[in-house]
Image (spheres, coloured by chain):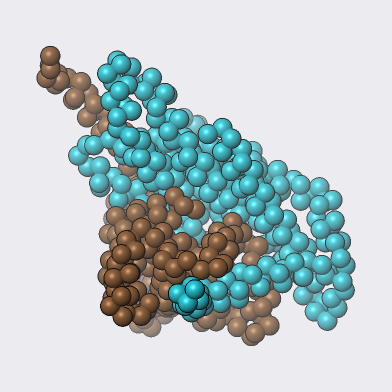
Chain colours: A cyan, B brown
Amino acid sequence: MRAVTHDERAAAGLLAGLVAVLMAVTAFPILYSLWISLFAVNLRRPNRMPFVGLDNYIAVLSSPAFWGSVGRTALFSALAVAAILVIATLVALLLDQEFPGRRILSACLLIPWAIPSVVNGLMWKWIYDSNYGALNGLLLQLGFIGSATIWLGDSNRTLPLIANAFIWKEVPLAAILLLVTLKSIPADLYGAAAVDGAPAWRRFFAITLPALRPGFLLVTLYEAMMAVRHFDLFFLLTEGGPGGASDVVAWRIYVETFRNLSFGTGAAMSYILAIATLLMSYALIRGMARTL
Amino acid sequence: MIVPRPIAPRMLRLAALGLASLLLLAYVLGPVMWLLSSSLQTEREIVSIPPHWIPESPTLANFKAIFATGLGLARPSPAGTDPSSGGFIPSVAANLLPAMANSFIVAVTVTILNLLIGVPAAYAIGKIRFRGRGLTLYAILATRVIPDIALVVPLFLVVRKLGMLDSLASLIIAYLAITVPFSVFVLASFFEQMPDDLDRAARVDGCSRLRVLTHVYLPLARPALVAVGLFAFLASWNEFLLALMFTQTAASQTLPIVVAGITSDFTVSFSFLNAAGVLAVVPPVLLAVIFERYIVSGLTAGAVKG
């Protein structure tokens, strides 16, 4: 019995720093945010802060503009996650092979992961530039297009183009996670299949793809969370434009809070986003765990 | 009967792998090379159509301007100077080095605090059974699910109330919230894998918990410590959203904020813009490439259980 209490006390001492950080910078803000979301806080009228109950939530949930941004967030995330899964699987399959130069390749793969998202935004904005950008330059030189295109100005292309920048930065991490899953497949499985004379493509569909499922779940979960909350590229590339074509939920929270200075609705929206993220993760885990 | 594998399929396999590797390299490095190439071009060359993929007359003028103005050796060009005449130094150039210094101070402080807070907590979770262990783990996981943008509004109001807006301290505290849970997670899974016997043997010899941690486990945990330190550094160096809210003047602005400001400034030439981007990219990319092994093992340790 004494050992247990001693351990409890040791654990408490060792955990003090972590608990302080979690309380001060995570738990408290979350509760404070809930509190704020029940008031009509507007920094333009700092002395008046009437209690409005769930009015902020009702206002947000009954606004067509909000649901429009939810749809765009869903589209952006679906595009990004699907593309990341496909590209990262191909990359992981390549890096799973033994060949000269493999180590240099995997070191280079970390570069997009390490680049600050602001520079990622700057870089792709410059690539997409309508006058001097690399995309127009390349496509013109190759003869795919006849004249320079205003890429980000086309509201049908904005979301896919921003998703492309997001995908480029996220593929490395996803590929690393899938590669670990690949490495954990027992080699005997392949050996047995080779003895049975199964061709490479059948081995891929019968062994590799099913074995990758836990990796797919992890990557889908993580990348969906990252995509749904993503803000930086929207700020840097389009500021929600053109004409609201890239007005996603994260951007809307920013505008509502820091441009319209409506902290109450901003907090309500962040709360809705946080709860939606939790539900989404839960559903993904449940849904995919069942198919495993 | 064992037949030696014929040469042709092996060559074919290598050729296919080589081609795939080249494609991947082009995808990964292409955009970065274009950033680098653009940063080395003159203001005249950067607006050529079609673009020059490799600078015809590469110049370090942008970087010289950043360092000269940042160190107070040169002044930005007065407004109204014709940018196309060359040698035009935008006034924001002087902000880049101070911002880089801010980024370094914040990132290094966050890294050190991460290890100081994270190592003991991770050791407790990994090696001690105590009531509330499960709850602590859930709390850590929960922080990773909550979007950072959801924390922005309340944190901003708190920081404002405490009069800490526009200070590096506000950034350091906020970044601890983002990085510490992940550090604890990676380190705890590392400690958990280590044999308990080490702990028991040392404790029998009369070592305190703290001594066991510092003298037995820490030396063994070096790879995990390097990985966790790197993650904390990179996350702080790259963070944008919170810095955008909390900082207002050059006194506290970090590099991403100043670079973002340049991105939306139409008076700054494209080549200077790219040079500012290169400046922000060099430290994290160097760290990532040098410590690739540590990072990959750390990422997988953090993710497999997350």
Horizontal side of residue B108 vs B178, given as left or right: left
Residue at 22% x, 37% y is A99
Q: Residue furthest front?
A: A1
Horizontal side of residue A177 vs A261, given as left or right: left
Where does the image place residue B207, in percent across and percent down from the top left? Answer: 32, 79
Q: Residue furthest bottom?
A: B163
Where does the image place residue B110, in percent across and percent down from the top left? Answer: 45, 74
Along the viewing direction, whichever of B86 and A13 lies nearer the viewer: A13
Residue A130 visible in rendering? no
Residue at 77% x, 75% y is A43
* A68 up-or-down from A198: above or below: below
Where does the image place residue A140, in percent across and percent down from the top left? Answer: 45, 35
Residue at 46% x, 41% y is A215
* A143 up-or-down from B41: above or below: above
Q: How many marks?
A: 0
* A75 up-or-down from A266: above or below: above
Residue A184 visible in rendering? yes
Q: Quadrant of residue B12?
A: top left
Residue at 33% x, 40% y is A183
Horizontal side of residue A107 vs A136, given as left or right: left
Along the viewing direction, whichever of A64 and A100 lies nearer the viewer: A100
Along the viewing direction, whichever of A108 and A179 lies nearer the viewer: A179
Where does the image place residue A101, in percent across and percent down from the top left? Answer: 22, 42
* B68 up-or-down from A286: above or below: below
Along the viewing direction, whichever of B98 and A175 lies nearer the viewer: A175
